[in-house]
Structures are given as C-alpha cells and as structure tokens.
Image: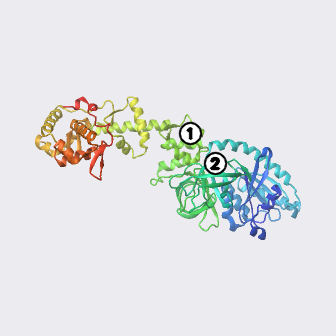
Amino acid sequence: MIIVTAGHVDHGKTSLIQALTGTDADRLPEEKQRGMTIELGYAFMDLTDGERLAFVDVPGHSKFINTMLAGVSCAKHALLIIACDDGVMPQTHEHLGILQLLNLEHLIVVLTKQDKVDAVRVDEVKEQVSELLAQHQRQSQIFVVSAQTGLGIDGLKQAITELAQSQIQALSKNAEQASFRMAIDRTFSVKGAGLVVTGTVISGHVSQGQNLYLSGQRKPVKVRTLHSQGRVSERAQHCQRVALNITGVDQHRGAERGDWLTALEPAAEAPKVISGVFESCLPFKHWQSVQLHLGNRHTTARLGLLQTLADGTALVELQSEQSLGCVEQDRIIVRDAAAKTTLGALRVLDINPPKRAKRSAERLAYLENLKQCGSLTASLQVQIKHHCVSKSAFMWANQLTEHAAILVSEQVLTLDGYLVSAELKSQIQAQLLSLIEGYHQASPELLGLSINRLQRMTHNQYPLTVLLKLTDSLREQKQLQSTRGLLHLPRHSLALSDAEQLLWSQIKQQMLSANCPLWSSDLAHALNLELTVVRALCRKLIQLGYLSAIIKDRFMLTESLYFYADVIRKQIDVTGEIKTADFNSIIKLGRKASIQLLEFYDRSGLTWRKKKDNSRVIRDGSIFIASDLAEEHRS
C-alpha cells in the first residue's frame, strides 16, 4: 500500500514522514540546502507479518505542481498536512482539490507543528479544516502532531497501520485479475546490473524473469531482478513501490520518466484522441488548449465539448499532442494551458472513439451509459450491448489478464475473439435475415448474397468473423442456406423460367459448337436479343453455376473450366510447370483466350504465376476437381 502526502510548502510533510519512518525523503543536495522538497521522495514503514507501507513525499511549492501531480496521479490514500502556525493556505486548497478529482479513497488530515502554537490556535485551525472538508464534501480523521516532540505520532502511526492492514488483503485479491502496469518515475544505471527503473505498480503484479512491454518500443524487455517496497523481492503487486532491473531496452531510445511498463503488448500506436466525462472545477471553453497530467507525464491537448450533462459534468473529447498511454477509467488531471490553475479531471470512458458522428444521439447516449457504470462488469455489459467488443482490445483497455472472471461470465458470449451480449447476437441475426429478405424482394432473379457484401450492407458495423459465426448458426437452425457461397433464405430458390430455359439451351449449344469463350455481344447477336437482356440472363446462369465469366462480359461453360483445369494439372505433373505457349498449343483457343483463362485460374487460386519466366505452377490443387462438379452442370 502507498500513501502520498499533500499540503502547502514548509508545512512539515518531509519531517512528518521522517518521524513516522526514520527516513529523510529529501535526497538531493539542493533540497538539503534550501530546506524544501523539489523532487518526489520515498520512505517505508514496516508493518506486521513482514508487510511494508510506502510513503510518497511530494513538493508543496506552487512552482513544482507538475512534480506533485506526478506523485499523486494514481493515489488512493493520502495525508493532507497543514501546519498549525499557518493554517489553511493556497496549496492546501489546490492539493485537496486535486486529490478530490482523483477520487481518493482515504484521506487523513494531519495538523503539524503543534509545538509552535497554543491550544487556542490548534482549535482555530481545526475549525478551518472542518470548513475546508465541508466545502469538498469529505469527512476525515484529524490528528494533531509535532514531529519535533513526537506528540501524536504514535496515534497517527496506529491509524495508518490499521488502514494499511485493511487494504492489503483486498489488494492481493485484485492483483490476480488485473494485468501489470506501472508508470516510470526514475531511471538510472547501476554498475554491474545495468538499467533500473522505479515506479508505483498501478495494477496487477510483476515477477522476476517476466517479460514486459515498454512504451515506445515493440520488442519486450525482461525483468532481471526487482525490489519491492525498498527490499529485494521476487514479486511485487498493485500499490507497491518497485525498482526493476530490466534488459532489452532499445539503446537509441532508452527508458525515461513518463514511460509505461505493461505486461500486455500495447497496440501498434497508442491513441491520442480519447473520450470521457469531465468533472470541472472552473468554467472551460470548447476546443480550449489545456495541459493533461497522467502518471509521470504531461502534455498539451485540446478539450472538445460534446455535451453538457444535468449533473454539471460534461462529455468531452481530448486530442493530445502526445499519447498519455491511458486506459479506461484512468483519471487525467486537466489544467489550463499556462499551468496556473486546475480546470478539472477527466475520467476516461473510451480510448478508441469514432472519427465520425461524435455528437450523434446514439453516441452521446452510449457515453452517458458508460458514465453511469459503477463497475467494470457494468461497463462491459453496456459495451457488448451496443457493439461487438474485441476481447484483446478490451483486455488492454482495462488491463485484464486472461484469468479475469469478467471475461468468462455467463452473460458474455465469445464469438471468435469478440465479446457480445445475447441481446446483440439476436439483434444482428435478425438484421441479417431482414437484409437477405429485402434483397430477395428487390432481386428475385439472383440467388443470394456473399458474406462480404452482407457485411457492407450492415455498413461494416460488425466484424466479418462474427458474421461468419452467426450465419453458420442460422444455417444450423435452418433459417439460412448457402449455395455456392451465396447466402439465401431456404424458401428462396433460383430457377430458370421456361423462356429462360429455352435461351439457356441455345447458349449452351452455341458455346459447345464454338468450343471457346464467347462475349455477351456474340450471344446477343446469335439470339437476336438486347445486350442488357443477355447480360442479365448470364448473371443468373453464373449464379446457378452453369456459366463462368473468365473476364468481364466473356463467358465459358463451367464444365469447360473444370476440363481445362485437369489439362493444367496433368501438364504440371509431367513437366513441373506450364507455360502460356504450351497451354495454348494444347487447348487451341487462341493466345488471347489462353492468357485470359490462365489469369482466371490465377485469381481463383488454382495456379500461381512465376513472373520470372511467365510460367505457372499449382497453388491449390484441391479446387476445380471434375468429380466435384454437380451433375446438372455437366453436358
């Protein structure tokens, strides 16, 4: 467990930590000289059963607010420290406001420097603190201490110990569900060991020898050794301070403060555009320039207003100059562009927002539903109700392991790597049946739809693999049929009318007599029909499998395609390949038709063209097998 400090400069934060732990968290010579914390400091306090509690000491001066934000960005427990002689000061207000925005779980108020004032002043400061807490609608224990005399230190230590013991057991359980994630706050080299990075484990656990991913680098790094809570260890978990000796870091880029270490491999490029709910302390303008703070990194961004909500919050979109490496439910502190005031905090709802229809009623309702979710389970239910959720993307967006119980819930269906709800599954299947029904009514002369065209008709709302699974399910339920790769309703069958059957007989005889591919214009001339009529009939004959188009508007009997495929196979069995000239001399259709036919087989996957000598070899010999040709398609 980790507790951060907060409070105005020179209110005794570092001295209090030294009184609690015996460690001076100010380690820099400049800090010693100026008597003021400049960088983040760390100290540890031993608990029972070998556990340790970590303290993060942050600067109190307004000039070092960025460092303070880095220290508290992932805080859940804090000490708000107020000196009895000064009372509530500007940074007291600012630091408490920031802790409130970070959704702090526990806050302990400590009034320091009791030895410098009388009892009346202590009561006055207590009253100020009570008013301050009331403004922020927070209740907290208040301890009066003196780091110099030791007054109240034991009582404060006992309260901190009880809080830590109540939290450590819960943290251990959660560590198994979440994947490891850590924001790096220091990097340095140790002679004989190499690169060491330190930080606070935000989620999950890490072990010696484990592979991790460093932001900005695709190749994984390896944990050689680690320290947890200031001691050599083989494992560290959520809410612990760790130092990791890692290998495999890109020497050109290196590791730096603000980088992330994760157990899950990140996406190809971390997003710079995110959507979320913004809890504002001060008014802001649409598309205002702001500074974002998360982990140990900050960057500039634009704050776009999507919708103002009734409770005073707002749905917004952030477009940052650099990726923050955030995940869902992260809280990002937002300050004005000049870094003078804190505007509020953004709770991340979507790290991959759509590029269009950002303010559509459906999109805004979806974000508002996500905002209302109080748990990850509720959030997943909202997401799978609206769209198919990639399992790997959801795991990354919420830093979950494969063992997370939420991924194997009975309420969540898994379809080929996607998570969907039973309601959405039924909705998609009904939509598919409706689209096919409409297609039959609009084009009764055509057999059905390919799965790719069906996906396009849904405006690519759903992944192709999900549609394949659902159409297979509909076929098993006898609600759909597939004929030659085309999906259609069972009651819909494509058949030639008596007049079309007569025309087909004439076309077939003409092709057998010509013994070569024919153009649609040749057929129209021979049948004395309009070209458009012949083309429509040929499309229907292709659907039925009687004809095939080797190129646009040039047709051949399907049985002939199977025959010439056997010719190619036999020639390649003998010579190992077939050249265009050899194929032409065998089938005697003319060089142009031979080339068109060979290119048709290339596109179909039967052959592969060796461009070096313009010859073909077999790519997939399992297709165009004569024995597979349906009887009704034979002469």
Q: Nearer the viewer, residue 369 or 443?
A: 443
Answer with left or right where residue 174 lies relative to residue 571: right
Q: Amino acid at mark 1?
A: Leu
Name the disc covering residue 563, or none: none
Q: Is residue 298 visible?
A: yes
Tag 1's secondary structure? helix
Residue drawn at point x = 63 percent, y = 61 percent: 257
Q: Nearer the viewer, mark 2 or mark 1?
A: 2
Secondary structure of the residue carrying numbered label 2: loop
> Residue 91 is drawn in which quadrant?
bottom right
Indicate which disc, 2 or 1, sits on the residue closer to the N terminus.
2
Task: Please give left or right for residue 62 compared with residue 332 in the image.
Answer: right
Q: Residues within 10 Å of mark 1 (few under 14, many from 20)?
A: many
| Residue 617, picture quadrant | top left
- In this orientation, does residue 306 appear? no
Image location (x, y in percent) of residue 246: 63, 55
Q: Which residue is mark 2?
A: 209
Position of the C terminus, as image quadrant, is top left
Q: Who's the residue at 68% across and 41% down the image?
A: 173
**Disc 2 and disc 1: Cα gap in Å?**
27 Å
Q: Nearer the viewer, residue 262 or 616?
A: 616
Q: Above or below — where is 75 with respect to 83?
A: above
Q: Is residue 400 left or right of residue 149?
A: left
Residue underneath mark 1? 407
Residue 19 location, x and y as percent?
83, 57
